[in-house]
Amino acid sequence: MTLRKLPAVQALEAPKGSTWEAPSSAFHHWAPVKSAASDDANTININDSIGENYDGTGITSRLVGSILRKSAGKDVVVNVNSPGGDFFEGVTIYNMLREHDGAITVNVLGLAASAASIIAMAADELKIAKSAFMMIHNSWGLVMGNQNDMRQAAETFAVFDKSMANVYADRSGMPAEGIAKLMDADTWMDGETAVEDGFADGFLASDEVVEDKEQATSAKRKVDVMFAKQGVPRSERRKMFGELAGTQDAAGTNTQNAVDNPELVKALSDLLAEIKG
């Protein structure tokens, strides 16, 4: 059992025709950072979007669950630098951490936005860098379907919003009604504000967080983030890259690394420029 008495979040079925996303503003604030402290087998690094990306990257409940099972009965450190993503995966990870039979320390190294901020709330002790940010907001996603699908999605979103407000209120000590207003406003908090308002317990030492200038990012992932910053839904990005991965050359060879082609990356960048224009 954890040291804190944390509220559980009800696991609901995803509304028909819906996809859950991190707001594009979160990607604009996201930059690679890393902890100067050495990791061990009981460390979980949440340094990507929440949920599985088109190329198999991303932080999933399956990945986190695997680490927690190996760390049964042991204290766990969770390093967070994520723009958020799939709320269902975020809630599942939160509940997993909440139920872990060891202490959970969460370090917000750079950004804990959207679904990542929910995960951070599962901490017995939550520390944040002064230069880091947290962001809370109402459930955000894309819904396609008829009026009944839209109503079901709105009802599900409302249930999640209420549950999230209760989680943030439990951590901060603020009334849930006040938290709901912060969520309505898509509230950003720097490290000092997060500590002052009770969302975090204290600061990380300045030498515990450094910029990760050597992080290797594939051309595919860079383009994916570029489109995410412009608000292109994950489902559309996944579809686009899936089509590109299946492109065949004149000889009929499947060009699995098509997006790593500089010319194709330039073409995608030009397309992005058109979207922005």
Image (cartoon, rainbow, N blue to C red):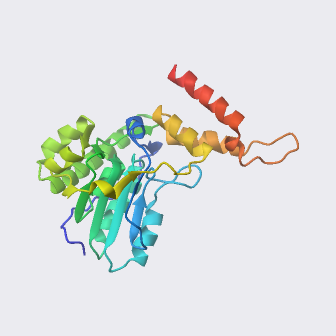
Residue at 56% across / 48% down in the picture? Answer: 217
Asked if residue 110 can be seen in this view, the reply is: yes
- Rendered location of residue 216, percent (x, y): 56, 51
- Rendered location of residue 253, percent (x, y): 83, 48
Question: How many discs mark residues in the rendered view?
Answer: 0
Residue at 28% across / 65% down in the picture? Answer: 105
The reply, left or right, for residue 196 in relation to residue 219 is left
Q: Nearer the viewer, residue 161 or 79?
A: 79
- Rendered location of residue 121, percent (x, y): 26, 57
| Residue lying furthest right | 251
Q: Nearer the viewer, residue 106 or 88?
A: 106
| Residue lying furthest top | 277
- Rendered location of residue 86, percent (x, y): 42, 49
Asked if residue 145 can be seen in this view, the reply is: no
The reply, left or right, for residue 181 in relation to residue 206 is left
Residue at 36% across / 79% down in the picture? Answer: 72
Looking at the figure, which quarter contains the N terminus?
bottom left
Q: Residue 136 sits in which quadrant? A: top left
Query: In the rendered view, would you say 99 is above or below 23?
Result: below
Query: In the rendered view, would you say 156 is above or below 60?
Result: above
Residue at 39% across / 45% down in the picture? Answer: 83
The reply, left or right, for residue 246 in relation to residue 210 is right
| Residue lying furthest front | 207
The reply, left or right, for residue 66 in relation to residue 116 is right
Query: In the rendered view, would you say 15 is above or below 10?
Result: above
Query: In the rendered view, would you say 28 is above or below 97?
Result: above
Q: Nearer the viewer, residue 265 or 245?
A: 265
